[in-house]
Image (spheres, helix red, strand yellow):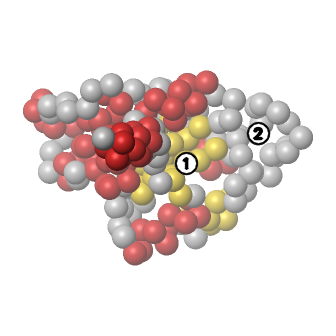
């Protein structure tokens, strides 16, 4: 009986610690060369409350994390950070970044790639094809597991290659419950 209890605790800790295997933009091109997949990008800032909620409630949801890890390369990008980005043969740095600042900082120039109608909002989730082209307009705002599920499955299953979003969404049957 104690063995089953211990096994249950191990399983519970595994489920509760589900995590997305995040990589950097600089590592993305190399990852795509060895294992081409669609890409999910989580653009966040350190001060953003909804970004922290999305990490805790959505990206740490066991089914969300497992699906992302199985079907995507996942990139976490601090839109106000000082990460040196190597992307598309270009080196992009946030020269205005101030390490002494707490809270808001200068926007990384690469963040503009994820603007919607010229505006940045956090969090923003973007989806790229295996050849690193934007698949759709980035999605701004907090997404719960049930809201992100159809989007992940549309791109992760590569349904976008066979049908429109509306066609996919008409027959989509959700499987994940919060």
Residue visible at 76% across and 31% down in the picture: 104
In the rendered view, does 58 fall on the left or right side of 109?
left
Residue 117 visible in the picture: no
Precedes in sequence: disc 1 or disc 2: 1
Residue 32 visible in the picture: yes
In the rendered view, does 77 fall on the left or right side of 148?
right
Residue that lies at the very extreme toward the front in this rendered image: 1
In the rendered view, does 43 fall on the left or right side of 70?
right
Instruction: Give the image location of residue 111, x and y in percent.
Output: 61, 44
| Disc assigned to residue 106 | 2
| Label 1 neighbour load within 10 Å: few <14, some 14-19, many 20+ | some
**Residue behind mark 1:** 76
Residue visible at 59% across and 64% down in the picture: 26
Q: Which quarter of the image is occupied by the N terminus?
A: top left
Instruction: Give the image location of residue 27, x and y in percent.
Output: 55, 66
Q: Which quarter of the image is occupied by the C terminus?
A: top left
Residue visible at 49% across and 72% down in the picture: 30
The answer to which image quadrant residue 47 occupies is: top right
**Who is closer to the viewer here, 176 or 119?**
176
| Label 2 neighbour load within 10 Å: few <14, some 14-19, many 20+ | some
Mark 2 lies on a secondary structure that is: loop
Instruction: Give the image location of residue 149, x and y in percent.
Output: 29, 35
- What is the CA distance from the residue labelled 1 to the residue labelled 2? 18 Å
Mark 1 lies on a secondary structure that is: strand
Instruction: Give the image location of residue 72, x and y in percent.
Output: 37, 55
**Who is closer to the viewer here, 170 or 8?**
8
In front of the other: label 1 or label 2? 1
Residue that lies at the very extreme toward the left in this rendered image: 171
């Amino acid at each position: 009986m104690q063995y089953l209890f211990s096994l249950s605790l191990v399983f519970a800790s595994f489920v509760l610690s589900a995590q997305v295997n995040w990589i950097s933009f600089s590592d993305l091109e190399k990852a795509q060369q060895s294992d081409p997949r669609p890409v999910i990008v989580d653009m966040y800032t350190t001060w953003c409350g909804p970004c922290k909620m999305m990490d805790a409630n959505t990206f740490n949801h066991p089914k969300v994390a497992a699906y992302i890890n199985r079907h995507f390369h996942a990139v976490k990008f601090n839109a106000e950070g000082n990460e040196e980005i190597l992307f598309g043969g270009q080196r992009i740095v946030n020269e205005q970044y101030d390490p002494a600042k707490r809270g808001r900082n200068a926007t990384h120039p690469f963040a503009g790639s994820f603007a919607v109608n010229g505006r940045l909002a956090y969090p923003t989730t973007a989806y790229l094809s295996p050849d690193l082209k934007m698949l759709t307009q980035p999605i701004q705002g907090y997404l719960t597991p049930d809201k992100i599920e159809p989007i992940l499955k549309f791109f992760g299953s590569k349904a976008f290659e066979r049908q429109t979003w509306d066609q996919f969404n008409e027959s989509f049957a959700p499987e994940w419950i919060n």
